[in-house]
Structures are given as C-alpha cells and as structure tokens.
Amino acid sequence: MRSLAIFDIDGTLHKTEIMSAAAFSEIMPELGLPVPSLDTLKKTYGLGTQAIYRLLQIPKDLIPRWEQLFFSYESRHISLCATAYEGAIEALHTLHDSGVALALCSMCPQGYMDAIIDRFGIGDLIDYARNETHSQDKGELVRQLLEQSSASAAVMVGDRSFDIEAADINGIASVGCLYGYGPDEAAKATLTVSTAWQIPDVVMQLLRQQSALKENSAQL
C-alpha cells in the first residue's frame, strides 16, 4: 500500500486572492452588489458555497444568477491568472516521484477543482480528489479519501483550522502552511512550513513516523 498526501487548494497550492479579486470585481457590480474587500474575500477561502453566500450576504433571489456568473467569471479568471505558491507544484512533483499518492481535498465545487487542475497542469499527479459535491464536512471528505486509497500512512496539508481538524478527526498527521490564509490556525498542525518548498521533506518525515509507529505496534 502506498502512503498518501492530501492537499487543500486555496492558501496551500493556490494564491486565491489574485484570481478572486479579479472575478469578484466583475461579478458583484453586475448583480448590483458591493465588491467585497480583500479581507472579506480571504475569509471565504476554504468555506463551502452556502457559507460563502452567508458571509457575502448574497440575497436568496440573486443566488441562481450569482451562481451562473460565478462559474463563468471564476473559471475564466482561473484560466487567465490563477497562480500557485512558489514551490507548491514542485512539491507535488517531488512527492509523486517519491511514490507518494496525492489527493486534493477542498470545499469547492467540482468545476473549480477541475479548472485548478487544468490551470496548474497537475492532472497526471492527482490520484484522488474530493470536494463539496461529496460532502459538506471536510473531516468526512478526508475519511472518504483514506477509505478509497487504503493508504498505509497519510498526511493532510493545509492552511486553515478545517484542514487541521479534519486530520485530527481521522487520526492522521497534518502540515500547517503558515504562508496561507490562516497562519494562527495552521500553527496548530503537527508540523508547520513557512514556504511550499519545505512541504516534501516535512510530509515524508511525518509519513515515516507513522509507518514506524505502525510497525512498532504490530510487533507488540
């Protein structure tokens, strides 16, 4: 069985504010709504769609139109300007080349995840993926990934409390990305990184530790 590294997207792989600021500057005026501040936009990263509606106070009668515009504008801006953190895509390649299975786990729509995969050219690297179409609970998404992969050891990599808590609930280690959108939250992870370049070494360290613990337990 292969070991597994599960990656969040926004704030972990993707500098989301570059894309979302451009998309929202077009979407909200078209709906007659104020453009959210960058600080407000950052609070939406990692949330499911329904939570984003509440945070941005999208009126219920505008939600169908908002969804239509959001999918169109967001997909276009992902293809135009979505930007990965320096070292993030290289980290995926390094882990993949080391024999680690890779998964994406994000509270985003399927179309968003597909657009990110295409933009970053990582389709051949990703073995498993889960998003809000599978569950509204990130802990449940991680559980599904662990079950599907039958991984011998696993690590969750993310930048928000949702990621750390999902790892804790499922009994796996976590890597907190301090460069993302919740550094105080990420600091509660098993280990932390200040740049994406550090991810492969830290992930491999945690996977080795888990494997060693399982071997020792089996020998008792």
Image (tube, rainbow, N blue to C red):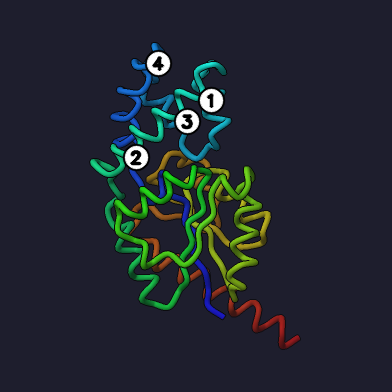
Q: Residues within 10 Å of mark 2 (few under 14, many from 20)?
A: many
Which sits earlier in the primary sequence, circle 1 or circle 2?
Answer: 1
Distance (Cα) linking label 2 and label 4: 18 Å
Which sits earlier in the primary sequence, circle 2 or circle 4?
Answer: 4
What is the three-letter code of the residue carrying label 3? Lys
The residue sitting at 27% across, 44% down in the picture is 79
Distance (Cα) linking label 4 and label 1: 14 Å
**Nearer to me, 160 or 35:** 35
Q: Is residue 148 left or right of residue 46?
A: right
What is the three-letter code of the residue carrying label 2? Ser
The residue sitting at 47% across, 67% down in the picture is 127
The residue sitting at 48% across, 62% down in the picture is 103
Distance (Cα) linking label 1 and label 2: 18 Å
Q: Which residue is mark 1?
A: 53
Q: Is residue 189 above or below residue 153?
A: above
**Label at residue 75:** 2
Q: Secondary structure at mark 2?
A: helix
Q: Secondary structure at mark 1?
A: helix
Please state the horizontal and vertical placement of residue 209, each as a whole percent of the image.
56, 74
Q: Is residue 87 above or below residue 34?
A: below
Q: Which residue is mark 3?
A: 43
Which sits earlier in the primary sequence, circle 4 or circle 3?
Answer: 4
